[in-house]
Every structure is written in structure tokens, then in C-alpha cells.
Image (tube, helix red, strand yellow):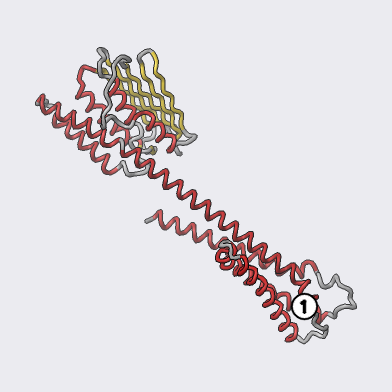
Amino acid sequence: MYENNRIVGLNLHHRNFKILTHVCVWLVLMALPYIMHSYRAMPSRAYTQEEINDFFKIDYMGYFFWIGTFYLNSAVLIPNLLLKKKYFYYSLTFISIYALYLFFHHQIYVALEIDVPYNLMRTIWLRLPAFLLTMAASLAYSLNNNLLEYKNKLNETDREKLKTELSFLRSQISPHFIFNILNNIVALVRLNSSELEPTVMKLSGLMKYMLYHTDEEKVNIKVEEEYLKDYIDLQKQRFGRKVKVETTFNINNEYQLIEPMLLIPFIENAFKHGVSSIDDAHITIELFAGDHFLNFNVSNKYNPFYKEEKDSSSGIGIANVSRRINLLYENKHELTINNKNNLFEVNLILKLDA
């Protein structure tokens, strides 16, 4: 609710700013005859002061016509005629508007009872530049607004596409994760292990995390740390002495935010490929988080000759994890993956928001 109110407030502020800008521009244009002293530049013989004042009145009344023409053209004629390629009707309306202006100009001229005879041809040529300038400015204004609207729609489309893609990549994690944990529970039940109850409690905590946090845009790094620790403990219970796991967690600011379930695929990958067919399986996991950065390292030994068959629960893969990080932290991350000497290493550095 707060976010929606904040957005509405910003839009209203933006609209008021546009209105104020338009008013200021028109006021400046209406003040130009006084600033430039256009009539005083004419020969003193041509017009008396009273006649000059009458011409100013005609001009100012004409400004209101130009203002109406500007917005009529930009809001109605251009989108409904010109942009729809109805050039004949637009041209006809174009000429009709100018003819209407000339009619009102003559009526005002007569009403003011100016002694100088009214010259229609002279008026047509003198007022035409102002009319053409108004229509051209209106066209530029309308096209610029259409361009901005088009760009906003493209940005909105890109954001929706990004949101959809991120949701898809995130949703791929959950089924594989649940599959592995349920296998752990089955194994403990068969062994009638005393670790069953704490394991179920940890699983409950993990499920709570997945239900209440995975749909959030960001979570506290402390919450993510507890999630990772519970997952690692469950895997250690599953494999027992078959694998040696060393972990180091150092969180300086537990309120720092991170995308949920961003790190778990690397740990899942380590347990999946770092235990099978290895006599001295060894996994190292390190997480350091400061106020403005995160450093995450995972390494595991692996058997290069072991070929594991893939199935529908084989996880999202390192390539998709990398894609997700690129989408979320573009130009704010460094992901290094090394695979040599039977050791698979992942190092991820993220620049966190202050």
C-alpha cells in the first residue's frame, strides 16, 4: 500500500511539473511582443498609440486561439488523423482551422473599430508563420510524447519479461531441492536414526523459508545464511563420514539484502558431484558479507571418470544459475568457475546495495 501511494505521488508531481512548464512557456511567448517592442519598431507615422494598443489586444486574443490549436492538434488531430494516414482529412482540417482563425481575427478587428482598413491578404501572410509554427511545435510535442510512451512500454515489457524469466529460473530450484531433502528423510527413517526429529525440524524451517521468502524480491543475508546452514546440516546427516565439509560464515551486516535462493544451487552442485564415486570427498563452503559486497566460495573434489545419468530432478545447472545472476546483478558481480586438477571451484563476488 505504501509503495502504491508513493508511486501515485510521484506521478502527480510529474504531471503538475508538466502543467507548470506549459504555463510558463505560453506566458513567455505572450510577453514577447512587449519584450521585443515589435510595433514600436514600425514608422511612427504608420500607427497611433491607440492603434498599437488595439493591435496588442488582437494579438493576445489570437494567442488563446493558438493555444487551443496547439492542444487540439497534438491531442486529437495528430493521433486520429495524421498518424492513421488520413492525410486528406488532416489537410482539410488544417486549412479549416486557419480559415476559422482569420474569421475570428476579422471579427475582433471590426469590433475594436480600428481606423486602419482591414487587409485580408496582408493578414493571411502576416499570421501564417505563427500558425505554421504552432502546428509544427504541436507536431513535435506529440511525436515526442509518443516516443516517450513507446519507450516506457518497451521498458515495461522488458521488466515483465525479466520478472517472468527470473520467476522461471527460481521455480526450477524448488522441485530439485525438495526431492533431495525428502530422500534424506527417507534414509533416516529406514535407519531409525535419532537425528530424524531435528532433521524434520530443519526441514520445517527450510519449507517455511521457501513458503514465505522465495517470492520476496530480497531477503536479509542472515536469513539466507541460516537457510544454507540448515541445508548443509541435512546433507551432512545424509552422507555422514562419506564427505568432509568445512564451512566458514562471516556476516558483518545481517540486515544486508540479497536475492533469495541465489547461492544454494552452487552448494547443491557441490554435494551432487563432489560425493559420488570419491573416496576422500571434501567440500569447502565460505561466505563473507560486508556492508557493500559479498564473497562466496564453494569447492569440491570430483571424479572426472564418473558419468552420472541426468534425470528430471537434476537441478537447474550452473549455466542457468549464471544467467540468473547476470539478470539480477548486471555489472555488479564477478563469477569465476575453475575446473582443474579434479577440483571444481566457484567464486562469486556481488556488489550489494548500500
Q: Does residue 195 appear in the picture of this structure?
A: no
Give the residue drawn at x 31%, y 37%. Answer: 172
Q: Is mark 1 on a helix, strand or loop?
A: helix
Q: Position of residue 201 (x, y in %)?
A: 18, 35
Identify residue for label 1: 55
Kind of residue sitting beneath label 1? Phe
In-image side of 189 versus 89 (left or right): left
In-image side of 331 versus 22 (left or right): left
Q: Position of residue 283 (x, y in %)?
A: 30, 20
Q: Which quadrant of the view contains residue 275?
A: top left
Q: Where is residue 212 in the image (x, y as percent from the top left)?
A: 28, 44
Q: Where is residue 256 in the image (x, y as percent from the top left)?
A: 39, 37
Give the residue drawn at x 41%, y 20%. Answer: 338
Q: Which quadrant of the view contains residue 235?
A: top left
State whether residue 48 is above or below residue 292.
below
Give the residue drawn at x 77%, y 87%. Answer: 113
In-image side of 9 versus 76 (left or right): left
Quarter of the image with the N terminus is bottom left
Q: Does residue 315 appear in the picture of this structure?
A: yes
Give the residue drawn at x 83%, y 83%. Answer: 116
Q: Camera-side residue: 143 or 58?
A: 143
Q: Camera-side residue: 269 or 128?
A: 128
In-image side of 39 versus 197 (left or right): right
Q: How many marks?
A: 1
Q: Which quadrant of the view contains residue 136?
A: bottom right
Q: Badge 1: few (under 14), some or many (20 or more) residues near its Cα, within 10 Å?
A: some
